[in-house]
Image (spheres, rainbow, N blue to C red):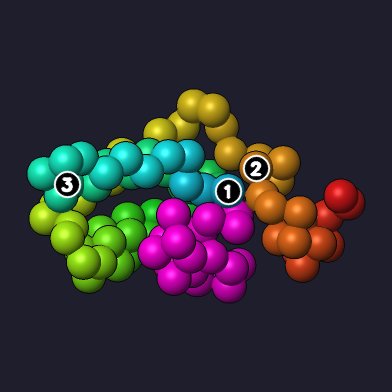
């Protein structure tokens, strides 16, 4: 998760972990990483760019041999998935 804090949503200028877009990261013993993540909406124009950046960022981490990113829609993303700091930065009530 810490490595993914370097991946920013280009529209909101905030990392995808703080935005609550990463639902899970699993490191396999053989060095493969599986990521379940979502987007703020199914029509997000930056979706392919974010997925590619997640893969590229994780591949730079020591010991990572491969990355599989699954974009999931269940549970749907909403502002409640964001960290408290992210909600404050974006003007949501906490």
Q: Is mark 2 on a helix, strand or loop?
A: helix
- Disc 2 crowd, CA 10 A, few/some/many (<14, 14-19, 20+): some
Taking 68 as reference, is 19 above or below it? below
Taking 33 as reference, is 92 above or below it? below
Taking 39 as reference, is 49 above or below it? below
Q: Residue at x 76, y 54 (%)?
A: 84
- Residue ID for mark 1: 20
Q: Earlier in the sequence, mark 1 or mark 2?
A: 1
- Residue ID for mark 3: 32
Q: In this view, does 89 lie to the left or right of 13?
A: right
Q: Which residue is drawn at 43% across and 67% down?
A: 7
- Disc 1 crowd, CA 10 A, few/some/many (<14, 14-19, 20+): many
Q: Which of marks 2 and 3 is nearer the N terminus?
A: 3
Marker disc for residue 81: 2
Gap in angstroms between the C-alphas marked 2 and 3: 26 Å
**Residue 34 % position (x, y):** 27, 42
Q: Is residue 56 left or right of residue 83?
A: left
Q: What element carries label 3?
A: strand
Q: Is residue 17 left or right of residue 90?
A: left
The residue nearer to you, when weighing 2 against 87, is: 2
The residue nearer to you, when weighing 74 against 47, is: 74
Q: Which residue is drawn at 53% across and 56% down?
A: 17
Give the residues in magenta: 1-19
Quick check: is 67 in the magenta stretch?
Answer: no
Q: Do the residues labelled 1 and 2 touch (CB within 8 Å)?
A: yes
Q: Residue at x 70, y 45 (%)?
A: 79
Quick check: is 18 in the magenta stretch?
Answer: yes
Gap in angstroms between the C-alphas marked 3 and 1: 22 Å
Q: Is residue 42 visible?
A: no
Instruction: Kindly give the residue lying farthest to the front in the view shown.
Output: 29
**Residue 26 % position (x, y):** 32, 40
Quadrant in which residue 89 is drawn: bottom right
């Amino acid at each position: 998760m810490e490595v993914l804090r370097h991946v920013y949503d280009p529209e909101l200028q905030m990392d995808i972990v703080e935005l609550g877009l990463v639902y899970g990261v699993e490191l396999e013993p053989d060095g493969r990483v599986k990521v379940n993540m979502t987007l703020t909406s199914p029509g997000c124009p930056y979706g392919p760019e974010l997925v590619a950046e997640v893969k590229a960022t994780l591949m730079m981490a020591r010991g990572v041999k491969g990355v599989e990113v699954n974009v999931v829609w269940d549970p749907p993303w909403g502002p409640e998935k964001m960290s408290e700091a992210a909600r404050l930065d974006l003007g949501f009530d906490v």
